[in-house]
Amino acid sequence: MLPSERLDFSPIGHRPKLLLPGGARLAVWVIVNVEEWDPTQPMPRTVLTPPAGGAPMPDIPNWAWHEYGNRVGFWRMLEVLDHFRIRAVLAINGSAIQRYEPIARAALERGWEFIGHGFTQQSMQKVADERGDIRRTAAAIRDFVGRPPRGWLGPGLTETWETPDLLVEEGFEYLCDWVLDDQPVWLKTRTRPIVNLPYTQECNDVAMMLIQHHKAGEYYDRAIDQFAQLHADSAQSARVMALVVHPYIMGAPYRLRYFRDALARIRDHREVLFWTGEEILDWYLGQGA
């Protein structure tokens, strides 16, 4: 099924009005991506180009760059989220639950939502058995959390032609890979539809810091500008805003303040709800959309 065949074109101003509870206008969800990088494989991303080129193994500088995020950066970000009493969404590789069990334990103790993020950090287009990978990821989360995950975020937003079909068949209720709207949308599959929740490539630290090479303060500037426009848009119908962070990026000492300051500014608004993905999903399903 072609991507354009999975959903109908729908201008946002032509839809029935969506209403959030309590007079709120905007639902914000914070997604923390926790990954395990296999040191026997080329690194998913690099901060330091190998001096002789190629993809040397072991790639100690780049593996350690990411590992710092899970050893140190995550815990800085956790303090910020605890301060604002925000329950985040943990998008986690299935293999990372065992490897970084203290991270998973901290998220579980705080009632964060766990969503699948592939079993390992590699493109879904390179996975030998995609259904098996999805199934292993769901099982790892279910065994640790006590219930299966409802949501899925592909590693690097990657999918095959079949991914939405397989997710539905394996019990998932929503995904986040289709970054094409400010409201949830239904995607068709070969069985029953699945909901796509608004994710972001704009307020995403990977895009800003690693690809576009902005200064750390760009995260704050862009998050606040994004919020201001979505809040204005939501006067007509509710909107959803995502904030995406990775421990090895926004958990770096010189970047953390901009994540904290963005949350502080947004938290000041009374017409905003900080929700998890499943809370957004349940609200949307309750709207009868």
Image (cartoon, rainbow, N blue to C red):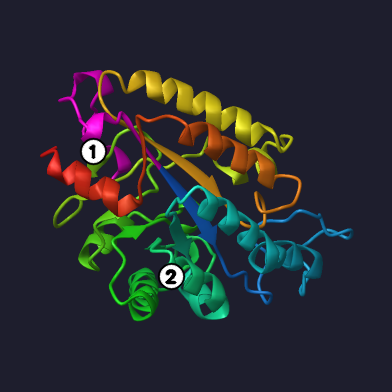
Q: Please state the horizontal and vertical placement of residue 42, each as a whole percent of the image.
A: 68, 67
Residue 19 picture quarter: top left
Residue 207 picture quarter: top right
- Residue position marked by numbered label 2 in the rendering: 109
Q: Nearer the viewer, mark 1 or mark 2?
A: 2
- Residue position marked by numbered label 1 in the rendering: 7
Front residue of this view, candidates 193 and 225: 225
- Indicate the amino acid at tag 2: Glu
Horizontal side of 262 relative to 188 (left or right) equals right
Give the magenta range: 1-28
- Indicate the amino acid at tag 1: Leu
Disc 2 on helix, strand or loop? Answer: helix
Front residue of this view, candidates 196 and 68: 68
Q: Is residue 188 visible?
A: no
Q: Please state the horizontal and vertical placement of residue 245, each as a whole percent of the image.
A: 56, 49
Q: Is residue 153 above or below residue 139?
A: above
